[in-house]
Amino acid sequence: MNSMDIHQIFQHLHHRYPFLLIDRVLDYTAGESLVAIKNVTYNEPFFQGHFPQRPVMPGVLLIEVMAQATGILSFKTAEVQPDDNSLYYLVGVDNARFKQPVEPGDQLLVEVKLVRITRGVWKYAATIKVDDKLVASSDLMCMKRDIPT
């Protein structure tokens, strides 16, 4: 079983608080798939405004959770770590679906599967479940780009 703690995640994503949304990688197989978790707490900064009377995690952040999981799998598959000269950018989101709201106290189980790599574009199928119930899914594409100097 290949797992990663938060310190290993820091080595594979440039994201930091409040935008690092992956808490732990439970398992991964380079070139195939990754399973991670995100613990959702009331202390998340977006809950102050979305929505104060009934806190719901924004769908766009669910997409970001899935995208961060694909980023980790991309780096593990390519057997490299991020550097200051390039980033993996999210370049496409298709078939995004949101089945039920995510609220404080939920633990997100994020599963991403590498579908293919074509001309430098990595395509993934991703899902998020809470208590074995599907809450979100999407096809995501990312691409490594050099940062202009």
Image (cartoon, rainbow, N blue to C red):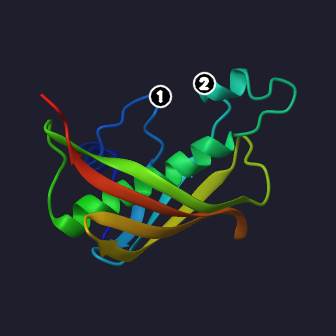
* Amino acid type for the residue under numbered disc 2: Pro
Task: Determine if residue 24 is in view.
Answer: no
Answer left or right for 55 relative to 16. Answer: right
Q: Is residue 86 above or below residue 4?
A: above
Give the number of the disc on residue 66: none
Question: Vertically, is 119 above or below 10?
Answer: below
- Residue 121 lies, in percent from the top left, at 32, 64
Secondary structure beneath dot 1 equals: loop
Answer with left or right where residue 118 lies relative to residue 124: left
Instruction: Report how many numbered discs are placed on residues in the image.
Output: 2
Which secondary structure, mark 2? helix
Q: Which mark is residue 45?
A: 2
For this rendering, which residue is in front, 80 or 121? 121
Crowd band around label 2 with a 10 angstrom C-alpha radius: few (<14), some (14–19), many (20+)? few
Q: In terms of sequence position, does the residue under pointer 1 or pointer 2 come before the other?
A: 1
Residue in the foreground of this view, choosing between 119 and 136: 119
Q: Quadrant of the N terminus?
A: bottom left
Q: Position of residue 15 (x, y in %)?
A: 35, 36
Q: Are marks 1 and 2 in contact (CB under 8 Å)?
A: yes
Amino acid marked by disc 1: Pro
Cα separation between marks 1 and 2: 7 Å
Please indicate, yes or no, whether residue 147 appears anywhere in the rendered image. Answer: yes
Residue 18, labelled with which disc?
Answer: 1
Query: Taking 146 as reference, is 5 above or below it?
Result: below
**Residue at image coords 25%, 52%:** 144
For the C terminus, the image quarter is top left
